[in-house]
């Protein structure tokens, strides 16, 4: 897959990230493509909506792709995600045998594809080819805007917690 094709695929993930942001979730989107280039799994962050710390975009997209194929092995698939996967999601990628991972922005806090740790370079039997920086500026800008808004406009619940802690 050439760089222009990677960008077109990442646009699909960015669309899902925008949906997540519109719902108040951290704007991360993910798409899984099969070997023919068809989308077989989509996901976006839903941790707040589902009250579930594991409701990351990658996990949702992997589950949908597995259901579509009727198999947990996604060894001919490519995963596109707007933010570098965390350790949990990297583990799910390895366990599902996804052969290629393409991500946008690096995650200096929890990134497990090189920013904090590179789990794909460790001694695990299942390794994916990893491509970083695809539409990274767009992904990073969306994340920055989201977190700026959260900091400047805390929810009522966050304001209440802040007031409770001040007293």
Image (tube, helix red, strand yellow):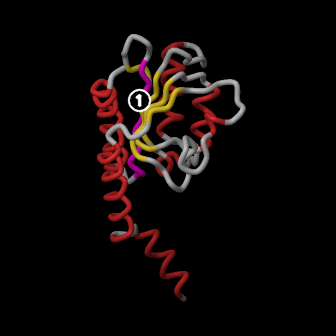
79 or 123, which lies in front?
123
Relative image position of residue 40 (x, y in whole percent): 42, 20
Residue segment shown in magenta: 25-33
For the point 31% across and 53% down, which residue is it?
141
Q: Is residue 158 visible?
A: yes
Report the number of numbered marks.
Answer: 1
164 or 113, which lies in front?
113
Relative image position of residue 147 (x, y in whole percent): 38, 61
User: In this rendering, is residue 24 above or below 39?
Assistant: below
For the point 52% across and 86% down, which residue is it?
166
**In the image: residue 98, left or right of residue 151:** right
Identify the residue position indicated by label 1 in the image: 31
Q: Secondary structure at mark 1?
A: strand
Relative image position of residue 149 (x, y in whole percent): 33, 64
- Give residue 132's quadrant in the image: top left
Q: Is residue 43 visible?
A: no
Q: Is residue 101 magenta?
A: no
């Amino acid at each position: 897959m050439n760089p222009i094709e990677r960008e077109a695929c990442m646009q699909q993930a960015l669309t899902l990230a925008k949906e997540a942001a519109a719902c108040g979730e951290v704007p991360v989107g993910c798409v899984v493509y099969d070997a023919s280039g068809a989308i077989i799994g989509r996901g976006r962050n839903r941790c707040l909506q589902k009250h579930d710390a594991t409701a990351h975009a990658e996990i949702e997209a992997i589950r949908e792709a597995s259901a579509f194929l009727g198999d947990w092995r996604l060894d001919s698939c490519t995963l596109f995600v707007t933010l570098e996967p965390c350790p949990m999601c990297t583990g799910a990628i390895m366990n599902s045998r996804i052969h290629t991972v393409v991500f946008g922005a690096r995650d200096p806090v929890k990134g497990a594809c090189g920013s904090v740790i590179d789990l794909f370079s460790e001694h695990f039997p299942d390794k994916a080819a990893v491509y970083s920086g695809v539409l990274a500026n767009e992904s990073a800008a969306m994340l920055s805007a989201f977190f700026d808004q959260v900091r400047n406009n805390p929810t009522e619940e966050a304001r209440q917690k802040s007031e409770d802690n001040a007293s």
